[in-house]
Image (tube, helix red, strand yellow):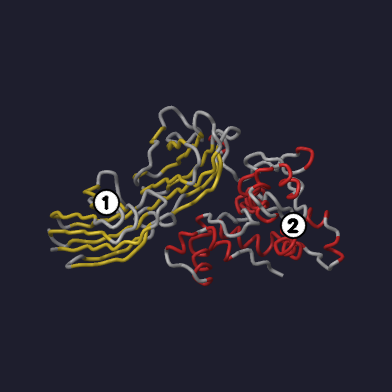
Amino acid sequence: MTVNLFDVNYYRGTNPDLRAAGLTTDTQLVDHFLRFGINDGRPFSPFVNLDFYRAGNPDLAAGGVNSNLQAFYHLQSFGIADGRRFSYGLNVPFYAAVNPDLALAGINNNEQRFEHFRAAGVNDGRVSAENFNVRYYLDANPDLRAAGLNFAQAFQHYVNYGFREGRPAVPGGSTPPPPQGEPGNNPGAAFNVDVLTGTRNFNEFVGFNDRDDYYRFSLQLPSAFILSLDSTTARVDVDLYQDTNSNGQIDSNEYVTGSFTNSRSLGAGTYFVRLQPDSQGRNTNYSLGLTANNTRDGLIDGGLLNGSRTFNEFVGRTDREDFYRFVLGSPSNFRLTLNGTTARVDVDLYADTNGNGQIDSNEYVTGSFTNSGGTASISRSLGADTYFVVVSTGSSSNSNYTLNLATV
């Protein structure tokens, strides 16, 4: 028996930007999840936390299970059957031990036990882990009870927020398991994003009892970098550092920036992102997006531009930058227009003067932007060369757009 971990309705409900992008059918959502969503860290089930699974089972990395997709398939094919832990609120072997009626009903293996909890046990309010009793959780947190949360909703609240907030979840004041795979409060305990390509999203928490969240990532090539931060209820400060001496720490001369309103070019290297609550330490959840693209990834090649080319594309939370390349065979009058947007979209032009196929810090030519319903435009004389156009959004807003490149 192999359990299907992907919950298409949960994926649809927790990722509303996909609906805005026209992805509505089950087939489209499954395809998006396998191609993009799994590696972006998008939630796909209320019962599974792949970061928890990988961090709590270090033998997986030793066996070559490193990506989210590999962890997903390993958990689906082997991990559940082996009784491995993959959630802050559910321990399948423990669930079987405290619910002996399951065996009497012929539910005898871990896949069957997990299916029982997912289909019935979570709604019945059954005890599911050493550190979590949903009935006690609701009794000990009257704000959740006043909000009308049912057992399944209370389970989701705990695994998404409650354990980070230190809410009581079992009698006797027992604490939840130590956060595994969570951003630590110093550079040495930073969440290791590893090599950053494309977009990674994280839904986390900072506040009075969790003053610092650190993330570490590396770039193998010079890249355009975007950091987005939203879904907060209080101020959160965010800073970027480069570990220039590779000592795994943040030194006084390694500060890069604390502002991420637009894309920023970063060189190859190792970086830290630090998030902190305001001076009062007010609690807030947050959604963090880290995006890195180099021009070898996701490039739309327009080839030799002689006349006009039009592209209808999309940028947003899950696709923050689009890269285009075109070649001018002779000096030309160049015109770019971008319209059809529903949010602010930036467009920048670069000349690949050294021919290395990358965007370097000294190759910026010019840029423009448009807000919803407006038009961004660039018109200028350009020499014979290879050029890049980068269309980006620094916000979490999604927008379609129409881009036209032309020689006139």
Q: Nearer the viewer, residue 274 or 159?
A: 159
User: Which amino acid lies under the numbered mark 2 shown in the image of this protein?
Assistant: Gly
Q: Which residue is mark 2?
A: 83
**Numbered tag placed on residue 175 in the rendering:** none
**Amino acid carrying mark 1 in the image:** Phe
Residue sitting at 42 percent across and 48 percent down?
A: 220
Taking the spot 85% from the left edge, 63% from the top edge, the residue there is 103
Mark 2 element type: loop
Look at the picture and state if 160 lies above or below 100. above
User: Where does residue 125 sit, x and y in percent of width and height?
Assistant: 75, 55
**Which mark sits nearer the N-terminus, 2 or 1?**
2
- On screen, residue 87 versus residue 10, left or right, reads right
Q: Which residue is mark 1?
A: 369
Residue neighbourhood size for the residue with mark 1, other residues' Cα within 10 Å, grouped as few (<14), some (14–19), many (≥20): some
Position of residue 229 measured from the top left corner of the image (x, y, whole percent): 45, 44
Contact? badges 2 and 1 (CB < 8 Å): no
Residue 400 location in percent, x, y? 35, 61
Q: Secondary structure under badge 1?
A: strand
Q: Quadrant of residue 92?
A: bottom right
Look at the image and tell me in which quarter the N terminus lies: bottom right
- The answer to which quarter of the image holds residue 296 is bottom left
